[in-house]
Amino acid sequence: ITVLSAASMADVMNEIIIEFEKDQERNVYISYAGSQFLAQQLLIGSPGDLILSAGESPIEFLLERDIVETETVNLLSNHLVLITRPDFFKGNISSLSLLSDNKIKYVAIADPRLAPAGVYAKESLTNLNLWGSLSDKILTTPDVRAAMLAVTTGAAQAAIVYHTDAITLPSIEIFDIIPQESYKEIKYILAINNSSSKKILANEFVSFLQTKSTENIFRKHGFEMYK
């Protein structure tokens, strides 16, 4: 089967696929990108038996066009954090308002047109009345991993990313200061392509993603099972 997955799932899904292939003796091919971009790819007929989206809007987009099956699965949840290079702020910070500091030239976020991570980041900054004052500093990237890369390379001084992505980088500082009520609940949603010729195996993979052993892998990577 071919799986289209949000870029923020890369590390954990690579590990899970190894386990599934061992268990089922089947091959899984996976493509990572921003979820909005993946939904567009399915729309134009790109191969993909199922999609794992990091937000509701790409799935809603596909459901409205009858591209995926109506029975979807809310699999995981996540939350946003702020990251910088080590010791950039020389101490702890308690508010995103510090992003207005003159020494911060750019704040990286995933492009809201391509990835839900950017939608959540923009929504949070808007609800905190910061989007207008920071809009000239916003550096958009294709996905959340690229936003992190912007910080590690120095292209941006800070980024708003998923907690699960942030903890994969030992060389950054993480500030868990973004109020979760400032953005919509983050859901990772599974949907099977209506055009898939391998729906039985796709459903087996969906079931595998909900087993206890797989849940342990998700939790190891910082994800929470959706409740």
Image (cartoon, helix red, strand yellow):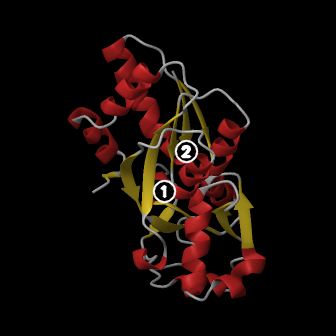
Check disc 1 and report the residue beneath it.
166
- Dot 2 or dot 1: first in sequence order is 2
Secondary structure at badge 2 equals: strand
Estimate the x, y position of residue 179 in percent, counting from the top left.
Answer: 43, 78
The quarter of the picture where the C terminus appears is bottom left
Q: Residue at x 49, y 38 (%)?
A: 69
Q: Residue at x 47, y 82 (%)?
A: 93
The residue lying toward the viewer, choosing from 50 and 121, is 50
Is residue 223 placed above or below 204 in the rendered structure?
Answer: below
Secondary structure at badge 1 equals: helix
* Circle 2 Cα neighbour tier, 10 Å, few/some/many (<14 / 14–19 / ≥20): many
The residue lying toward the viewer, choosing from 56 and 26, is 56
Estimate the x, y position of residue 190 in percent, counting from the top left.
Answer: 45, 42
Q: Is residue 220 left or right of residue 184?
A: left
Disc number placed over residue 113 in the picture, else none:
none
Q: Is residue 209 left or right of residue 138?
A: left
Is residue 167 visible to us here? no
Question: Looking at numbered disc 2 in the image, what kind of residue is underneath it?
Answer: Ala
Is residue 109 placed above or below 58 in the rendered structure?
Answer: below
Q: Residue at x 70, y 65 (%)?
A: 156
Question: Looking at numbered disc 1 in the image, what kind of residue is underneath it?
Answer: Ala
Estimate the x, y position of residue 184 in percent, counting from the top left.
Answer: 47, 70
Depth-wise, is mark 2 or mark 1 nearer the camera? 2
Check disc 2 and report the residue beneath it.
6
Q: Quadrant of residue 88?
A: bottom right
The residue lying toward the viewer, choosing from 167 and 178, is 178
The residue lying toward the viewer, choosing from 142 and 153, is 142
Is residue 197 placed above or below 99 in the rendered structure?
Answer: above
Of all residues shown, which one is farthest toward the top?
Answer: 25
